[in-house]
Image (tube, rainbow, N blue to C red):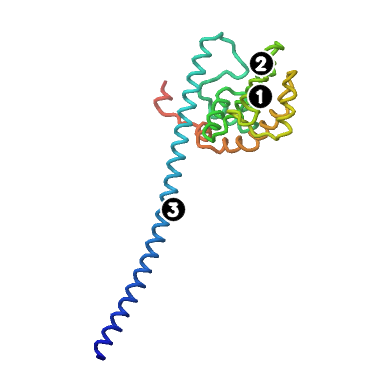
Amino acid sequence: RVRCGARRGTARAMQSALFLALQHDGGRMERGGRRRSSEAEEAEKGRMKRTIIKDWKTRLSYFLQNSSNSTKMKSKKVGKHRTYFRPSPEEAQLWSEAFDELLANKYGLAAFRAFLKSEFCEENIEFWLACEDFKKTKSPQKLTSKAKKIYNDFIEKEAPKEINIDFQTKNMIAQNIQEATHTCFSAAQKRVYSLMENNSYPRFLESEFYQELCKKTPITRAAQGT
């Protein structure tokens, strides 16, 4: 009987030890699973970032190509900043001196617009550009129709490209477009400009694509011989 009791005691002890071991291993597996899950999430984030950058570059190339083709079909007027060609590193570096320098350059504007698309906030630059076009409109009839379109596209609640402005400004615009003037959207445009200048613009300057534009390409012997 003593031996039987001892065996049962030994068996219980072994079961307890096995249970503790399984718990310990289970904990390790759970922690390991968490680590693997965390690593998988980081890898997925990395893949998403690479995909966004690749898509951004593709969008930019497509945008520039189409803009360049349409420009060639028009008159050969030379603007303040000509260029849909890749800028020199020195020209690209000028964009970091002021936000206006970036917006005034056609390639810079296209690059910034593509960057905002990658951050899912392209409505800001589209609204700003629509306002710039609106201010150049001379016909009163066109002014009214453009004002309503801008309001419908960017201002009203749940608009397809709704911008982030306060309720008071929205109400003021809704009243002003009834008798549209060139200053209808001035307050909202300043707000959006400030938002881009203080938030999106610094991130653009730190982006991989902009940094690549600023890099000077080494001159090869073949290039030197030409």
Instruction: Report x, y in % for residue 17.
Output: 33, 76
CB-based contact (under 8 Å), mark 2 and mark 1? no
- Name the residue located 72 percent from the left edge and 12 percent from the top edge: 140
Q: Mark 1 points at which residue?
A: 151
Q: Residues within 10 Å of mark 1 (few under 14, many from 20)?
A: many
Of marks 3 and 1, which one's residue comes earlier in the chain?
A: 3
Locate the C terminus by quadrant: top left
CA gap, disc 3 and disc 2: 52 Å
- Which quarter of the figure has residue 110? top right
What amino acid type should be assigned to the residue bearing mark 3? Ser
Which amino acid, mark 2? Answer: Ser
Tell me how far mark 3 sits from mark 1, CA to CA: 44 Å
Mark 3 or mark 2: whose residue is earlier in sequence? 3
Please determine whether, in this image, residue 159 is positioned above or below residue 44. above
Residue placed most toward the observer, 73 or 154: 154
Real-space Cα separation, disc 2 to disc 1, in angstroms: 10 Å
- Ranked by sequence position, the earlier of labels 2 and 1 is 2
For mark 2, give the secondary structure: helix
Residue 38 is tagged as: 3
Residue 145 is labelled as 2
Q: Counting other residues with Cα less than 10 Å from the Cα at mark 2, is it few (<14), some (14-19), or many (20 or more)?
A: few
In front: mark 3 or mark 2? 2
Verify CB contact (< 8 Å) between mark 3 and mark 1. no
Look at the numbered discs 3 and 2 and tell me whether their residues touch, using CB distance below 8 Å: no
Residue at 47% of width from left, 40% of height from top? Answer: 49
**What is the x, y in percent for residue 214?**
53, 32
The type of residue carrying mark 1 is Tyr
Q: Is residue 59 above or below residue 41?
A: above
- Which numbered disc, 3 or 1, marks the residue closer to the eye? 1
Quadrant of the drawing holding the N terminus: bottom left
